Amino acid sequence: MNITVVLHEPQDLVNIAGVVRAMANMGLERLTLVDPAEFDPWRIAGIAHRTGHIVENARVAATLEDALAGATCVVGTSARPRTAQRNYRRPRDLAARILDRARDGEVAIVFGREDRGLSNEALDRCHEVLVIPTSPAHASLNLAQAVLLVAYELFLAGAGAPPRLPTGKRSLGPASAAELEEMYRALEAGLVSIDFFKARKPESVMRVLRTIFGRTTLDAHEARLVRGVGYEMRNRVERGDAPPAD
């Protein structure tokens, strides 16, 4: 991905390691450090495990001007209000545009130092400025957190996000209409056997149950389990089993 994370004057090596880990999690690999207070690739790689491919290729620049020299699009980040009006954007609103610009040239996303962020002079070099919404009572984000949130939005906007959430190992896929109808018949029969409908209309109760189960997509295993509950209620009554002691 033709996107470079630029850390302007980072002060804490642990924060740099946190940034590297966040980048690896979200598929970003290009890192530039501008005049870092401390930079020890061996220690960073030790903190952010399995990120050697990022740390070894990280670039150290003397000035922000040097770091941004090859970028065709520069995006800054800021948490605090400024006097000057700028092109402020939310990460989610700008993510697709960043990815689009990265197809034609290098995009640099610049994060300021931990204690005071980016200066106005640094923001002057940015074409747009990302503002991550946070609670006004505690607006400042840790450097690695800020990078992770921006990288996450880029990940979701791109092709990197998995198309589906993971499913359980026992999942058999969504229950078919026939399996669901069998489940409802078994559940209704079980409720009849325990005289559940004596003061209720069966069709009204079953309609509510259909609505409840309809709010989620039951898989075949889940439908069979509910069906089994209905069958077991009916069978227990037919056998005349005594209820278990409290």
Image (cartoon, grey):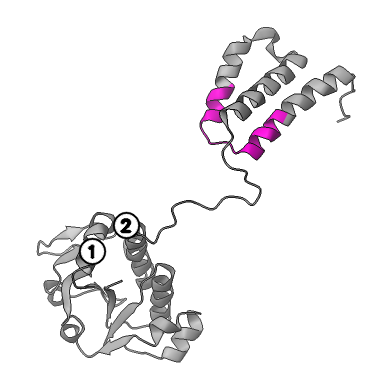
Q: Is residue 93 visible?
A: yes
* 215 magenta-colored: yes
* 71 magenta-colored: no
Of the image marks 2 and 1, the number of the one nearer the N terminus = 1
Q: Is residue 141 visible?
A: no
Residue drawn at x 76%, y 25% is 231
Residue for badge 2: 157
Which of the 4 quarters of the picture holds residue 181? top right
Which of the 4 quarters of the picture holds residue 149? bottom left
Most common secondary structure along the magenta stretch: helix
Residue type at mark 1?
Ile
User: What stretch of residues is rendered in magenta?
Assistant: 209-227
- Circle 2/circle 1 CB separation < 8 Å: yes
In the depicted structure, whether residue 82 falls above or below residue 192: below
Q: Considering the image in quadrants, where does the N terminus appear?
A: bottom left
State the residue in front, 121 or 52: 52
Residue 137 coordinates in the image, percent (x, y) = 33, 57
Residue 121 coordinates in the image, percent (x, y) = 12, 77
| In the image, farthest residue toward the left | 84
Q: Determine which of the numbered discs, if any, sits on residue 98 in the image.
A: 1
Q: Which structural element holds mark 1? A: helix
Q: Which structural element holds mark 2? A: helix
Residue drawn at x 46%, y 91% is 42
State the residue in front, 15 or 153: 153
Query: How dense is the environment of label 2, judged by Cα within 10 Å: few (below 14), some, or many (20 and up)?
Result: some
